[in-house]
Image (cartoon, rainbow, N blue to C red):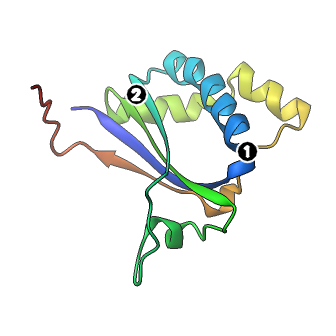
Amino acid sequence: MSYVDGFVLAVPAANRDAYRKLAEDMVPVFKRLGALQVVECWGDDVPDGKLTSFPMAVKKKADEAVVFSWIVWPSKEVRDLGNAEMMQDPVLKAWEEEGRQPPFDGMRMIYGGFEVLLDAKLTP
């Protein structure tokens, strides 16, 4: 059964294009590491909650949007190997050498790995 890494983060609206570029640059890296799918979603209907919400979880500021994304892996084993190899990837090494920073505050990112419980493909 496949395995999913999920992420929720706040990205300044002014950094939308930079975030998309970062996500696009990462697609071949994830593919090379064995991922099956990468999905990035820019929030446009993400209400504040009274008790809990995506905006509250990432301490979203007024000028930010919530991003919800996930990476599908064929298995947890492939994901674990991919994550271990990721930091040695030439693309990430080049970014590190250039001092390139992500266009968001990584300290407010929420992430986790999830075992797929149900995957129902719905067709019309």
Task: Please name whichever residue, 99 or 39, is drawn nearer the observer in this view of the structure.
Answer: 39
Image coordinates of residue 24 in percent, x first then y, are 61, 25
Q: Which residue is mark 2?
A: 78
Q: Of the residues shown, which amino acid type is indicated by label 1?
A: Asn
Q: Is residue 87 visible?
A: no
Task: Please name whichever residue, 18 or 119, is drawn nearer the observer in this view of the structure.
Answer: 18
Image coordinates of residue 96 in percent, x first then y, are 83, 34
- Residue 68, numbered circle: none
In this picture, residue 52 sits left or right of residue 96: left
Q: Is residue 39 visible?
A: yes
Q: Quadrant of the C terminus?
A: top left
User: How far apart are labels 2 and 1 at the CA level?
Assistant: 31 Å
In this picture, residue 73 sits left or right of residue 119: right
Position of residue 9 relative to residue 61, above or below, is above
Residue located at (40% from left, 25% from top): 37
Image quarter for residue 28? top right
Which callout, 2 or 1, points to the residue nearer the camera? 1
Residue located at (73% from left, 29% from top): 92
Q: Which residue is mark 1?
A: 15
